[in-house]
Image: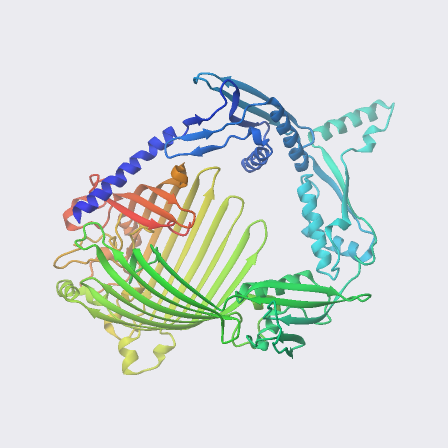
């Protein structure tokens, strides 16, 4: 196996050496099937003239590039070490002139009316039989026109009142850019406002924008020299800061479009089929809603909670979409259609909801490389078989139940004598109810669709080679809350709570582990089994603004607070009583072609001293502890091979500690990503990264060295640092990742490498290195 690892390391090392050469040659372009004797478009540049922020410049350049005539666009194909250009178009100045017309149209739409655009071309004949044309466009947008005054002239009192009362929400305000896009967005905002206040038939075509960019007073003739100087000063200021006046008007007073509607009858057809011949119509009224079925596939009582159209209330477009989304998110129906039928000559609108069921059962099976890491299963990489069965209409309630079976293995770490280190088989059954149960009427109507109720059962068995066999049974009842906020920085909130969360783990120690415990008694306090009765909560917030994506999440678990008050022999012996909290923040910053990923993680867990079994008081149960190393953590270390703290221990042999755990973890990761090429249609990206962190214990215990326990004064010494480079092969549906990392600073080496402890760049190449194979990008992004 050692020779196999060396071979893999050598191959990867050579691949990584190719990265700088790839970057060096990436600018080389091979031209094929070009028009001989004629100039062809080889390169097109757009040069933006003026003072712009980086974001403004990037947006303008992107928009201007989109305006290029098709015959001016250079389409180069990325290979691994070069680019190819096939069938380049013949250069024609008429196409450049067309591009200027398109660019000028874009600039005017964005509020730039005094632009200046020209181009230059040059021909390169240094290549035999090729006349390469490079076209440079010079674009000077001029001063951006801004809105000086905005007037709403809607003639209809109710429409005018609504517009005036919501001006704080307007997309256009004084000094906003005079952009057609912003004006169109404001028309759509007003349309949505009116449709949410009863005006069902109102649309944006009823609103028009009238504007002028000239102050008439500046044209007034005068002979007074002082007034002339004042007018000249105003003209000069207007050239420096040009403005426009905007008036939004109502196009007509169409009584039909200006009728305010109210909600009437709601009828639901939950099992729409093309032909109902020979089927009996079953009609039932539930909470004022008529449910018509032909095959009785659904319980009628499940529909009212998903319908947000109360009879007699004013029509609201938001209520319409709320109902549409409620049925779409259930997944029970593949097609949801809501007909809005205004009554002739009345101000009432009826609704017919047609639901076409999706297939009740869905079966799936996948063979994949898993990135799931846990202390129990490790890194199940390469052989993970998943088989699942989903029921989209469990118990005729539009609830979803899913059963999944999984089998996976963990591959050996560098230096391991065996290729397969762990095997795991698990069976999971989940039931998701699309509402809060029990429904006591405590949830406000606007939040009802945000809640789901979860019931889950899991059984798993893990065989850790030569060490232990662990069987885990888990059951939990919980709730999930999702909410999305649409703004300049879209945010998604996901909050879950599980109570109760019941878990029992049964550990069978193998001979090797017993032998290790004999020579290293502190392991007895780590490898324990037992019972957990806990409450689990988590909050995840995702979002981003401009080119940034952010994720922040917090997890908490507390076990034994209530159950520990019960006294009996089983709980006294088996119950864990602990609290565990961790938080993670990640940011992805996207640039024009590259990106920067950043992550911070911190977690801490504490086993309470009043845990009754003394063997369980010293630390968290090992299957709840933190660990480091592997393809998604400290990549210069193999999985579970870093820490705790600055300890020096053998990984194999008598008195060894093969796996390293801790009650606390700190970690920071930074990764710079860049494109390399696209050989054979596969996108290849490169990465340079650094990882910083470690794990620690919190409490003193018999035979536990002080170096393993966290102390703030030792943080600088205990921190591990690794760095490396990697290749990512993007196959669209997943990414294969090869990372090669080096230990820059190792606080917890094996005794054979004790001389390198905390020595910067102490290891020789291929001694302090680690190869990692992963699926998708590490740490969230």
Tally the numbered discs.
0
Is residue 104 visible from the viewing direction of this image? yes
The percent position of residue 410, horizontal first and vertical second, equals 27, 57
Q: Residue at x 53, y 54 (%)?
A: 491
In this rendered view, identify the residue nearer to me: 204 or 552: 204
Q: Which of 356/485 is in front?
A: 356
Quadrant in which residue 257 is drawn = bottom right
In this rendering, is residue 191 above or below 344? above
Q: Left or right of 2: which side holds 185? A: right
Left or right, 626 with respect to 355, comes to left
Q: Nearer the viewer, residue 260 or 681?
A: 681
Where is residue 390 drawn, in percent x and y?
44, 67
User: Residue 742, percent across and down?
Assistant: 26, 42
Can you see residue 319? no
Residue 72 sits in quarter: top right
51 on left or right of 552: right
Residue 7, above or below 382? above
In percent of the image, x 67 and y 52: which residue is there? 169
Whole-percent x and y of residue 508? Answer: 21, 70
Seen from the viewer's position, the closer of residues 270 and 225 is 270
Q: Residue furthest bottom?
A: 568
């Amino acid at each position: 196996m050692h020779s196999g690892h060396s071979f893999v390391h050598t191959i990867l090392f050579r691949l990584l050496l190719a990265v700088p050469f790839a970057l060096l040659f990436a600018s080389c372009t091979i031209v094929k099937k070009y028009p001989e004797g004629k100039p062809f478009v080889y390169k097109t540049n757009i040069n933006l003239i003026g003072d712009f922020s980086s974001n403004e410049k990037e947006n303008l350049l992107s928009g201007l590039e989109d305006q290029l005539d098709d015959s001016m666009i250079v389409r180069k194909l990325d290979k691994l070490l070069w680019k190819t250009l096939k069938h380049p178009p013949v250069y024609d100045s008429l196409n450049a002139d067309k591009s200027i017309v398109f660019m000028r149209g874009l600039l005017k739409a964005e509020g730039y009316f005094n632009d200046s655009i020209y181009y230059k071309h040059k021909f390169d004949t240094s290549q035999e039989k090729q006349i390469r044309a490079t076209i440079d466009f010079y674009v000077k947008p001029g001063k951006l026109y801004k809105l000086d005054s905005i007037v709403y002239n809607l003639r209809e009192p109710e429409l005018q009142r609504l517009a005036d009362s919501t001006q704080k929400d307007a997309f256009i305000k004084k000094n906003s850019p005079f952009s057609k896009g912003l004006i169109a967005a404001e028309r759509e905002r007003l349309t949505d406002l009116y449709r949410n206040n009863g005006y069902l038939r109102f649309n944006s075509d009823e609103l028009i924008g009238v504007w002028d960019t000239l102050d008439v007073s500046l044209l007034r003739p005068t002979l007074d020299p002082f007034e002339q100087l004042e007018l000249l000063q105003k003209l000069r200021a207007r050239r420096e800061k040009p403005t426009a006046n905007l008036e939004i008007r109502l196009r007509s007073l169409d009584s039909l479009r200006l009728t305010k509607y109210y909600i009437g009858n709601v009828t639901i057809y939950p099992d729409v089929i093309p032909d109902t011949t020979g089927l009996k119509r079953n009609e039932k009224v539930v909470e004022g809603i008529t449910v018509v079925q032909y095959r009785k596939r659904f319980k009628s009582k499940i529909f009212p909670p998903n319908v947000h159209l109360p009879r007699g209330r004013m029509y609201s477009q938001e209520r319409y979409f709320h109902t549409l989304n409620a049925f779409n998110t259930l997944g029970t129906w593949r097609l949801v259609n809501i007909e809005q039928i205004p009554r002739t000559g009345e101000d009432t609108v009826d609704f017919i909801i047609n639901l076409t069921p999706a297939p009740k059962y869905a079966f799936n099976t996948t063979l994949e490389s898993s990135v799931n890491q846990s202390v129990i299963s490790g890194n199940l990489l390469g052989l993970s078989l998943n088989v699942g069965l989903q029921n989209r209409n469990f118990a005729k309630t539009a609830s979803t139940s899913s059963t999944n079976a999984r089998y996976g293995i963990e591959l050996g770490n560098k230096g391991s004598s065996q290729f397969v280190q762990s095997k795991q088989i698990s069976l999971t059954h989940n039931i998701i109810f699309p509402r809060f149960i029990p429904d006591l009427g405590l949830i406000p109507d606007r939040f009802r669709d945000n809640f789901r109720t979860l019931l889950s059962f899991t059984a798993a068995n893990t065989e850790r080679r030569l060490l232990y066999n662990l069987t885990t049974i888990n059951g939990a009842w919980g709730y999930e809350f999702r909410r999305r906020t649409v703004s300049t920085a879209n945010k998604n909130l996901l909050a879950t709570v599980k109570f109760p969360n019941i878990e029992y783990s049964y550990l069978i120690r193998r001979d090797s582990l017993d032998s290790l415990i004999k020579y290293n008694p502190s392991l007895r306090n780590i490898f324990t089994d037992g019972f957990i009765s806990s409450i689990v909560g988590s909050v995840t917030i995702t979002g981003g603004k401009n080119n940034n994506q952010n994720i922040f999440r917090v997890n908490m678990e507390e076990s034994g607070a209530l159950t520990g008050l019960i006294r009996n022999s089983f709980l006294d012996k088996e119950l864990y009583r602990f609290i565990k909290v961790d938080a993670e923040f990640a940011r992805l910053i996207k640039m024009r072609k590259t990106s920067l990923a950043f992550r911070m993680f911190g977690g801490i867990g504490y086993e309470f001293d009043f845990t009754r079994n003394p063997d369980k008081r010293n630390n968290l149960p090992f299957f709840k502890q933190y660990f480091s190393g592997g393809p998604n953590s400290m990549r210069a270390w193999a999985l579970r091979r870093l820490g705790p703290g600055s300890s020096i221990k053998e990984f194999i042999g008598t008195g060894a500690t093969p796996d390293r755990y801790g009650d606390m973890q700190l970690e920071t990761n930074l990764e710079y990503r860049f494109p390399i090429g696209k050989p054979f249609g596969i996108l290849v990206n490169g990465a340079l990264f650094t990882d910083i962190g470690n794990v620690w214990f919190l409490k003193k215990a018999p035979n536990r060295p002080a170096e393993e326990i966290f102390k703030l004064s030792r943080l600088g010494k205990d921190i591990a640092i690794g760095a490396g480079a990697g290749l990512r092969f993007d196959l669209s549906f997943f990414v294969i990742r090869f990372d090669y990392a080096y230990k820059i600073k190792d606080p917890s080496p094996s005794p054979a490498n004790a001389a390198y402890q905390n020595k910067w760049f102490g290891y020789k190449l291929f001694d302090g290195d680690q190869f990692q194979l992963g699926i998708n990008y590490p740490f969230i992004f």
